[in-house]
Image: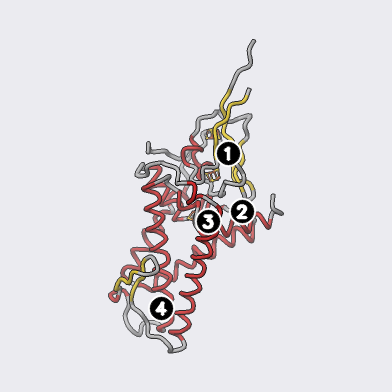
């Protein structure tokens, strides 16, 4: 069995403006603004749909591939 | 961009109606502009009181307006703003500029209250374009300084709304939120309050 590659979102804390645009559009509810400071993604539940990246005005979300 | 809907409909998604109400009321009677102070104080209540940006994340009428027109109905190009507009120096520079303009507005209000300056029955767009607005004020209905503050606050709110809408049309729906002075200040407060986490 080979390793399964999966896409997930990642937020660069220093770039995030904590606007919350991403929270509203996440179908799994796994991206959340933490303590008004930055957004964080629970990558174990993220399905890599990219909707958060689509709306992020700060360019803080990148899609990454993990094994 | 392709319209993008929130996953769950919430009551606060309709708060954009407050923006429309606010600008419409100020068009007919400038004294309603004082209601804009709610949008100045509430973000701080959330940030200082609870250490959250729940105002930005949920209850900001401006954020909801830009999300609805730009994202939900797809009037935005969906492009990312150029990196210089998203940079920290621009964000903090704009905050400094915005706050100095706010201070200037308070000073003008003070001069009018002290009788050192005449009330100017006009809205000033982009801190320089004077737009006559006399129909919205009946002389003597309130103190001149109260009217001056209303014209000043309305000018600030309308100017920032226009910038926000232009950014929304050209870039991602809530691009304004990446430079908004209120958003910048409340994030700073939350970071300090939560020990720079
Ligand atoms: S990629 Fe999709 S599932 Fe993952 S955090 Fe973003 S919106 Fe949510
Ligand atoms: S949309 Fe972008 S900037 Fe806004 S909270 Fe999410 S990751 Fe941060
Ligand atoms: S960043 Fe400014 S416009 Fe955007 S949601 Fe926060 S207060 Fe409202």
Mark 1 → mark 3, Cα distance in angstroms:
24 Å
Write down the residue under mark 2. B52
- Tag 1, which chain? A
Crowd around label 3: few <14 · some 14–19 · many ≥20 (10 Å): some
Residue where numbered disc 3 is placed: B91
Q: Identify residue for label 1.
A: A31
**Chain under numbered label 2:** B
Which mark, by number, is residue B106? none
**Residue for point 36% across, 63% down:** B23
Give the residue at x 45% y 79%: B108
Q: Chain of mark 3?
A: B
Where does the image place residue B50, in percent across and percent down from the top left?
Answer: 64, 57
**In the structure shown, which secondary structural element does the residue marked by tag 4 occupy?**
helix
Up the image or down, A34 lies above or below B22; here it is: above
State which quarter of the image contains the N terminus of chain B: top left
Tell me whether the residue at label 2 lies in contact with that at label 4, contact meaning CB atoms closer than 8 angstroms. Answer: no
Label 2 to label 1: alpha-carbon separation: 15 Å
């Amino acid at each position: 069995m080979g390793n399964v590659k999966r896409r997930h979102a990642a937020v660069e804390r220093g770039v995030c403006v904590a606007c919350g645009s991403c929270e509203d559009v996440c179908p799994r509810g796994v991206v959340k603004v933490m303590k008004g400071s930055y957004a964080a993604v629970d990558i174990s539940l993220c399905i890599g749909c990219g909707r958060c990246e689509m709306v992020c005005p700060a360019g803080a979300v990148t899609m990454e591939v993990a094994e | 961009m392709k319209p993008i809907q929130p996953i769950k409909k919430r009551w606060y998604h309709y708060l954009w109606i407050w923006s429309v109400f606010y600008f419409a009321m100020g068009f007919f009677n400038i004294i309603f502009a004082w209601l804009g102070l709610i949008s100045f104080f509430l973000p701080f209540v959330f940030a200082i009181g609870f250490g959250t940006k729940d105002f930005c994340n949920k209850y900001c009428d401006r954020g909801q307006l830009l999300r609805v027109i730009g994202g939900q109905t797809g009037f935005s190009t969906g492009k990312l703003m150029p990196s210089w507009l998203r940079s920290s120096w621009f964000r903090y520079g704009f905050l400094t500029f915005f706050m100095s303009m706010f201070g200037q507005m308070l000073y003008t209000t003070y001069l009018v209250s002290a009788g050192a300056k005449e009330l100017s029955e006009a809205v000033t767009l982009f801190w320089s374009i004077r737009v006559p607005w006399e129909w919205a004020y009946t002389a003597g209905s309130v103190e001149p300084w109260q009217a001056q503050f209303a014209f000043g606050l309305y000018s600030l709110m309308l100017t920032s709304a226009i910038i926000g809408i232009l950014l929304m049309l050209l870039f991602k729906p809530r691009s304004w939120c990446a430079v908004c002075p209120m958003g910048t200040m409340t994030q700073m407060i939350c970071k300090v309050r939560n020990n720079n986490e």
